[in-house]
Every structure is written in structure tokens, then in C-alpha cells.
Image (tube, grey):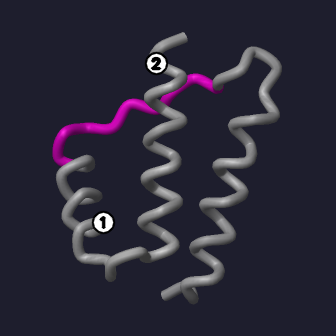
């Protein structure tokens, strides 16, 4: 299992990559309903104010913004 800092660093890198694209937003990956359900369960199991939860929430906001464009 990866240490929490490594997971947070990975999410930070992924989120940072979104701001570097020339067109504004990269193509969005489509996730199945089952995958999203499992991810949501794992996210809810994290402690309150978990850095990973904050990063995932921020990623969701970026995806929402890309859908609007």
C-alpha cells in the first residue's frame, strides 16, 4: 500500500496536468457505474478532511468545468 503522501503526490501531478493542456481540458475518461459506486464507497470511508478526499473533490470540480466547455 502506498503511503498517504505518495497518493497525494500522484493526485497532485494528475490535477496539475489538467492546467497544462493547450485546448483547456483533456478528454474526459468515462467510468462505469459500478466503478463509480466502488470509488464513492472508498471515498466515503476516508477520514474527514483527508488530503486524498480533497484532491478527488477538486478533480471532480475540474471534470465538471470541462463538461461545461
Along the viewing direction, whichever of 33 and 47 lies nearer the viewer: 47
Q: Give neighbour class at mark 1: few <14, some 14-19, many 20+ (Cα, 10 Å).
A: some
| Residue pictured at 48% horizontal, 88% vertical | 1
Horizontal relation, residue 15 to residue 64: left or right: right
Is the stretch drawn in magenta largely helix, strand or loop?
loop
Q: Is residue 10 above or below residue 7?
A: above
| Residue pictured at 28% horizontal, 58% vertical | 39
Q: Is residue 4 above or below residue 32?
A: below
The answer to which quarter of the image holds residue 10 is bottom right
Residue 20, image x, y percentages: 81, 34
Q: Are marks 2 and 1 in contact (CB under 8 Å)?
A: no
Residue 59, image x, y percentages: 51, 46
The tag earlier along the polypeptide, 2 or 1, is 1
Along the viewing direction, whichever of 16 and 36 lies nearer the viewer: 16
The residue lying furthest to the top in this view is: 69
User: Label 2 belongs to which residue?
Assistant: 67
Horizontal relation, residue 37 to residue 29: left or right: left
| Residue pictured at 78% horizontal, 27% vertical | 21
Residue range corresponding to the magenta coloring:
26-34
Quarter of the picture containing the C terminus is: top right
| Residue pictured at 69% horizontal, 37% vertical | 18
Q: Secondary structure at mark 2?
A: helix
Q: Is residue 10 a member of the stretch shown in magenta?
A: no
Q: Is residue 8 above or below residue 54?
A: below
Residue 4, image x, y percentages: 55, 84
User: Label 1 belongs to which residue?
Assistant: 43
Horizontal relation, residue 49 to residue 62: left or right: left
The answer to which quarter of the image holds residue 19 is top right
Q: Secondary structure at mark 1?
A: helix
Residue 9, image x, y percentages: 68, 70
Amino acid at each position: 500500500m502506498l503511503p498517504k503522501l505518495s497518493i497525494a503526490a500522484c493526485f497532485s501531478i494528475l490535477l496539475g496536468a489538467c492546467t497544462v493542456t493547450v485546448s483547456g481540458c483533456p478528454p474526459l475518461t468515462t467510468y462505469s457505474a459500478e466503478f463509480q459506486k466502488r470509488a464513492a464507497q472508498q471515498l466515503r470511508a476516508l477520514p474527514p478532511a483527508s488530503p486524498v478526499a480533497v484532491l478527488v473533490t477538486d478533480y471532480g470540480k475540474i471534470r465538471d468545468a470541462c463538461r461545461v466547455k
